[in-house]
Image: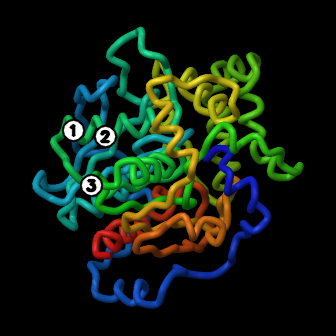
């Protein structure tokens, strides 16, 4: 799940679920009015699809990346990014919706998931935010995609934010669930009150040797428990979970997850080659590309209210609250709303 972010630590008390029906858009009236003339995604039931028609592999940067692809090769590129403990199946209903609207959809397994593998055994199993974002830039280069709409949640939302911050010329627009997720180890040193600290329990568990051993031993039970915690109103079945759980059987998965959360808390080093990028991110610069941020009204993962990060977005912007018991895995729980956001931000 999303980690210890500075905005979360200052503003967690403002993050309350809102029990309203339908879609609430928070943004300037002009931005809201534009949606009336856009392509409207047809009603879509979550769980309509269970697999991707096309999955491929490609060498990109430090990795051989596994990814699903849908839609016309000449369409506007959309890159959809998952988080932990999820995988590309978070977008199994979103991808065909966007493909039917003539987008070229790319859904990669992040490092440590699915069929993505490191090309060298000597490469550090590093999950710091700039390294993961560079993986996606390398994937775009390998696929000869100059610019793309980048959309994601959890680690994927963080990666979209990092890409838009460091390489705005590569991002036509972004959709980021839970807003501005750029972080820094130094900024995550502020202690939390008991309630939000409790919600971050897994990060502190992962900081210990027994936490790493426990995650490896009880991987399936652990991640299913996190799904229930993060999306308490999502009634997913075992088959839905099992399709994603297969991606955790990656030789680097445990090391990548441990490094991600330990690095965020300053308990593990990153790599010196990324120091300049992390220094730029630690200043929390505003994102200037067109953006839609989203939140589910039943997100059980700790998250900041939209008012806490509104000023981090300096370009065309809109925030959407998706109601109806939608949790942390927003694209899989509300694929119609997520796909619609991608199409709408493209028209900003």
Q: CA distance from mark 2 to mark 3?
A: 10 Å
Task: Look at the picture and state if 40 lies above or below 294.
Answer: below
Q: Which residue is mark 2?
A: 137
Q: Nearer the viewer, residue 118 or 61?
A: 61
Q: Give the mark nearest the N terminus, 2 or 3.
A: 2
Q: Report x, y in % for residue 161.
A: 46, 53
Q: Nearer the viewer, residue 29 or 343?
A: 29
Q: Secondary structure at mark 2?
A: helix
Q: Secondary structure at mark 1?
A: helix
Crowd rating for badge 2 (residues with CA inside 10 Å; few <14, some 14–19, many 20+): many
Crowd rating for badge 1 (residues with CA inside 10 Å; few <14, some 14–19, many 20+): some
Furthest-top residue in view? 122
Q: Give the mark nearest the N terminus, 3 or 1.
A: 1
Crowd rating for badge 3 (residues with CA inside 10 Å; few <14, some 14–19, many 20+): many
Q: Which residue is mark 1?
A: 141
Q: Report x, y in % for residue 142.
A: 20, 35
Q: Secondary structure at mark 3?
A: strand
On screen, residue 126 versus residue 89, left or right, reads: right
Q: Are marks 2 and 3 in contact (CB under 8 Å)?
A: no
Q: Report x, y in % for residue 84.
A: 55, 40
Furthest-left residue in view? 74
Quadrant in the picture for the C terminus: bottom left
Q: On residue 148, which mark appears?
A: 3
Which residue is depicted at the point 51% across and 56% down? Answer: 285
Q: Nearer the viewer, residue 7 or 46?
A: 7
Q: Are marks 1 and 2 in contact (CB under 8 Å)?
A: yes
Quarter of the image where one finds residue 65: top left
């Amino acid at each position: 799940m999303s980690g210890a972010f500075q905005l979360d630590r200052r503003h967690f008390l403002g993050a309350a679920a809102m029990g309203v029906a339908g879609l609430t858009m928070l943004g300037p009236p002009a931005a809201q009015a534009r949606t009336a003339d856009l392509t409207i995604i047809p009603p879509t039931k979550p769980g309509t699809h269970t697999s991707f028609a096309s999955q491929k592999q490609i060498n990109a940067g430090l990795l051989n990346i596994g990814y699903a692809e849908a839609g016309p090769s000449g369409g506007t590129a959309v890159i959809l990014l998952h988080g932990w403990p999820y995988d590309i199946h978070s977008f199994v209903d979103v991808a065909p919706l966007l493909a039917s609207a003539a987008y070229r959809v790319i859904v990669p397994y992040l490092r440590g998931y699915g069929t993505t593998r490191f090309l060298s055994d000597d490469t550090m199993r590093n999950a710091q935010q700039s390294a993961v974002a560079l993986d996606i830039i390398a994937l775009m280069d390998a696929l000869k995609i100059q610019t793309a709409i980048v959309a994601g949640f959890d680690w994927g939302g963080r990666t979209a934010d990092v890409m838009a911050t460091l390489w705005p010329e590569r991002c036509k627009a972004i959709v980021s669930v839970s807003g501005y997720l750029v972080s820094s180890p130094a900024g995550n040193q502020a202690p939390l009150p008991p309630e939000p600290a409790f919600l971050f329990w897994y990060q502190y568990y992962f900081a210990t040797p027994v936490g790493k051993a426990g995650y490896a031993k009880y991987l399936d039970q652990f991640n299913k428990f996190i799904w229930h915690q993060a999306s308490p109103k999502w009634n997913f079945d075992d088959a839905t979970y099992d399709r994603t759980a297969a991606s955790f059987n990656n030789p680097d998965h445990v090391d990548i997850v441990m490094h991600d959360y330990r690095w965020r808390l300053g308990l593990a080093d990153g790599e010196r080659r990324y120091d300049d990028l992390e220094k730029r991110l630690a200043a929390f610069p505003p994102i200037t590309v067109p953006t839609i941020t989203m939140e589910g009204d039943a997100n059980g993962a700790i998250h900041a209210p939209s008012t806490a990060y509104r000023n981090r977005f300096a370009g065309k912007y809109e925030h959407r609250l998706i109601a109806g018991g939608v949790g942390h895995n927003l694209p899989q729980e509300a694929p119609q709303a997520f796909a619609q956001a991608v199409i709408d931000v493209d028209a900003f």
